[in-house]
Image: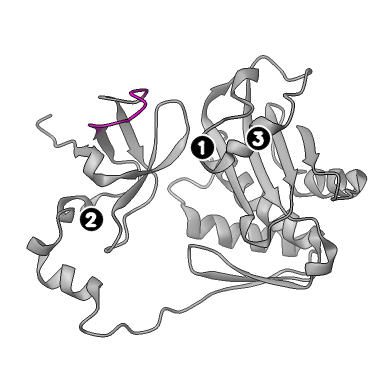
Amino acid sequence: MKYYIFHTPSRKIDTERVRTCLLHIADTTDTSDLIVALYCLPGAAQTRGTAYVHKKLTPRDFSTGRGKWAFTKKFPVPYDLPEYYKLIRLRIDSNNKRYPFIERDIYGWKFYYPSFNDHLATLFAHELHHFRRYHLHLHTGEGEQSANKWAVQHVQSLGYAVNAEKVKKKNKSKSSLNTLLKKFPLLDPYADFRHLRIDDQVFITHDPSRKYLHQTATVKRPIRSNSKRLVITTRDGKSWRWPMKWIGRITPDD
């Protein structure tokens, strides 16, 4: 495993601490072809991670000018990247003054991080789970919920003081949008998409850039009942929240 750390002048990074943490988390995983790009930037609400593991990447794929990772273009591409590799991108704020820190993710989990190290370890472990599943063929059939569970158990077993729990959803009002859409599916223009499951295939019918036009894509996670976008993975391994009005269903007769 090779790793690269990028940061602004205002962020002082203990690179040895980061190196020790990443190697500790990945110690029992074959990461011989894995690259980790860590961006330590200000912004408490900007913590995120993405694992690009569905295809081999080349040095020209290291940074992007699009989407939530567009800022990566502001940093240089390392000169010593291998010809082919898999990539995990991480973004985290290294400001120690924010810890201890409580964070809620989009999957309904609440995390308590006493320190930056605990936060980094858990974030990396979550993305490492995806690398292990799709590249090493471990954790078959597991998704985001399992990735969270595995990450927490893994870092705790290594001595990191992370606490996490799945927050129970509050009972929603009978008049809520979700209930109405389920009761009256004709009100929902995307009702046919609600039955899609992970790894189902869809067809891209519109793309302003025309890069993915008329290509198939893979469903990355099921759709929330009130969502107008579908999380998909295109053939190049990139993930998107694609508007469903720009997507077509693939049926068994297609």
Q: In the rendered view, does 95 fall on the left or right side of 237?
A: right
Frontmost of labels 2 and 3 is 3
Q: In the rendered view, does 170 fall on the left or right side of 85?
A: left
- What span is colored magenta in the figure? 204-211
Q: What residue is disc 2 on?
A: 194
Residue appearing at x 48%, y 63% in the figure: 107
Q: Earlier in the sequence, mark 2 or mark 1?
A: 1
Q: Position of residue 217 (x, y in %)?
A: 33, 33
Please tell me whether residue 41 is drawn above or below residue 57 in the rendered image: below
**Mark 1 nearby-residue class (10 Å; few <14, some 14–19, many ≥20):** some
**Mark 2 nearby-residue class (10 Å; few <14, some 14–19, many ≥20):** some
Hey, which quadrant is residue 199 in on the image? top left
How many dots with numbers?
Answer: 3
Q: What residue is disc 1 on?
A: 134
Quadrant in the picture for the N terminus: top right
Instruction: Name the kind of residue labelled 2 in the image.
Output: Arg
Secondary structure of the residue carrying tag 1 is helix
Instruction: Name the kind of residue labelled 1 in the image.
Output: Tyr
**Mark 3 nearby-residue class (10 Å; few <14, some 14–19, many ≥20):** some
Instruction: Name the kind of residue labelled 3 in the image.
Output: Thr
Frontmost of labels 2 and 1 is 2
Hey, which quadrant is residue 74 in on the image? top right
Magenta-drawn stretch contains 47: no
The alpha-carbon separation of the residues under discs 2 and 1 comes to: 24 Å
Q: Position of residue 68 (x, y in %)?
A: 54, 43
